[in-house]
Image (cartoon, helix red, strand yellow):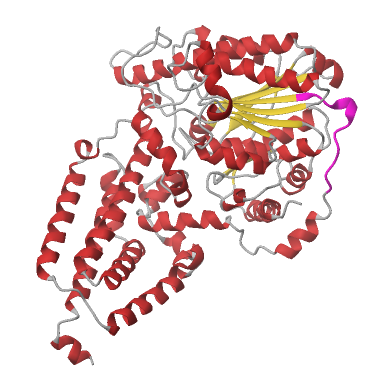
Amino acid sequence: MLEKLKSKETWKPFAIIFLLSLVITLITLVFACGQEGVRSPIFKSYLGDPLLIMMNFLPIFIAFLLIYALSGRVWVGFLTTSIIFFLLSVVEKYKLLFREEPFVIPEIALIRESAMMKDHYDISLFGSDPLAIFAVVAIVAITVLLFKRYPMPWKGKRRWQFFGSVLALSLVLFHGFDGLYFTPKVYAQVGNEDVINVYNRTEEYMSKGFVYPFLFSGRMLIGDKPEDYDKKLAGMLWNDYKETAIPEDKKVHVVSVMLESFSDFSAFDGMSIDPDVYRCLHEIQGEAVHGNLVTDVFGGGTVNTERAFLTGYSGANHSGTATLLKDVSSHVRYFKDNGYVTEALHPIYGWFYNRKNVNPRLGFDEYLCYENYFKPIEEATGDDKWGYTRDEHFFPEVEKRLNRVASEGNYYFSYALTYQGHGPYADYNQADGRYIEPIEGKSMQDWAIANNYLSLINDTDKAMGEFVESLRQNQAPIVLVFYGDHKPWLGENDSAYHTYGINTDQSTIDGNLNYYTTPYVIWANPAAKAKLGLDFEGEGPDLSPFLLMKYLFEYMDWPLDAMMQVQNDYLKDATVFHTPLLRDGKGYRHIDGDPELLEMIRQYRCMEYYRKNEEIN
């Protein structure tokens, strides 16, 4: 049979497919290794890692074979395969450039959002990267050559037998993101850690190429099941935790506000910021509990901080987890079960991060967004050129909704997310004033980015100050919690951070905290202080977003819901769990290499995983 195949030269297309799959793999690796400065050492590390090459090559090769068998034409197989992986690589390139985070499979569901947001960025593929031109020219040229060399299609029973064999192999390798290809131990071995910052998750992803970590990210869809997870045991342990009731005499309205890209840069030396930019924040902090929130995202990924706060679930995979395809246990649902009216507000499109579908699954009675609420408000203000409701008009609507609920004799829990501080920020000055001083001899583009950002923060600060003053006069007992979702993107490769001397070296604890920390504030009006018998003053601990609600409950002396009880038992006195750091009574510690901490985290994740995936009746 082998001699017969050789006589007909049917082996040649497969040799060509093998070689061309290597070419496509090379193209994806070129796009995977980032921008100039890090590109060369990372790309060299790819070429020195045969396992990495194989794991990135294998899906491309199998896809090529399947398309070839289906179409019977080599040129169709090559063109289709190369286009698919070239386009995915381009998305990866721009995710790394503008958001400093990798492209992962769950984000495919956000394609509409990505298309809408592309106009906010300067995307010039061929102008910014000559390699892209070369890749396109090479794809076209090779396609034409293949079309001329193999014009006749492959026909016959053997073609379909071959297709069935390759399909069976692919099912074994890739089935449900849980096949042999997705073995965690193999994934951990791929990539050279010597050329990256091992504490930077984006660089860790980049160190493994693109196709391999991209496909591996599909495991997010199966919920990141912990190692040695025992569902029956977790269920038995959960039976010891009971939901509690908020005493009527301690019920207050709880208004939570997450401020887009809000961070207090006046805390850094070397930044000559106009004192008015953060004047209201600092005044409010002086009469509130306040501290630092250590988020898990930078420059984007708002929804991760958001859903961590609302659910009590840790990590930074909240944007794509399959858990949220159904109703899920959450702190929101706890408020709802205690008789609260629950609402979420966001002054832009409801399809962002699929909030219009996900928020009801968290337990919100209403989700008010641009389409169903804020568009006419925007138009009524006469300030509708922005395409979203600015903070000075947004916050009064939050209080209006609260007053409506209070007038009906009910208590209110709201989660309001602003949009005004959203980036990117232009590298030429668009601001109406000078909010930070440039540094002589340093980049004026970086100054412009920082100045434009601070002009938005200045507006948010004033709007928040007016909001607090209005709530102060409100007769209803109100507790306000507000915090920033993440640090802002301030130029490629954190250029403005470097210009102003901010340490963002994530291999150090200080640099890590500088990169991920935003402020949080817990403030109460006089009516709430009187009802709860608390002064709401002082400095709170550093907190992870998923532990912020628990800290709020503890401070108000409310009974903890079941998730918070588990956090107390399994995370002990931890207030921050930000991989690879954990903060507890002993300060900040690296969990890597500490068997006791690692086992504690594993046990907690097992309980958390059970809670996220249990059925809601």
Dominant secondary-structure state across the stretch colored magenta: loop
In the rendered view, would you say 195 is above or below 57? above
- The spot of residue 228 in percent (x, y) is 64, 64
Left or right side of 479 for 315: left
Say if residue 577 shows up in the picture: no
Q: Residue at x 61, y 48 (%)?
A: 324
Left or right side of 64 for 334: right
Q: Quadrant of the N terminus?
A: bottom left
Q: Nearer the viewer, residue 410 or 588?
A: 410
Q: Residue at x 58, y 55 (%)?
A: 223
Residue 248 in the magenta stretch? The answer is: yes
In the rendered view, would you say 440 is above or below 532? above
- The spot of residue 420 in percent (x, y) is 49, 21
Q: Residue at x 53, y 29 (%)?
A: 371
In the rendered view, would you say 598 is above or below 121? below
In the rendered view, would you say 354 is above or below 423? below
Q: Residue at x 35, y 53 (%)?
A: 210
Q: Nearer the viewer, residue 367 or 521?
A: 367
- The spot of residue 419 in percent (x, y) is 51, 25
- Please identify the quarter of the rendering in which residue 23 is found: bottom left
Magenta span of residues: 242-253
- Please identify the quarter of the rendering in which residue 281 is found: top right
Q: Nearer the viewer, residue 141 or 284?
A: 141
- The spot of residue 15 in percent (x, y) is 20, 74
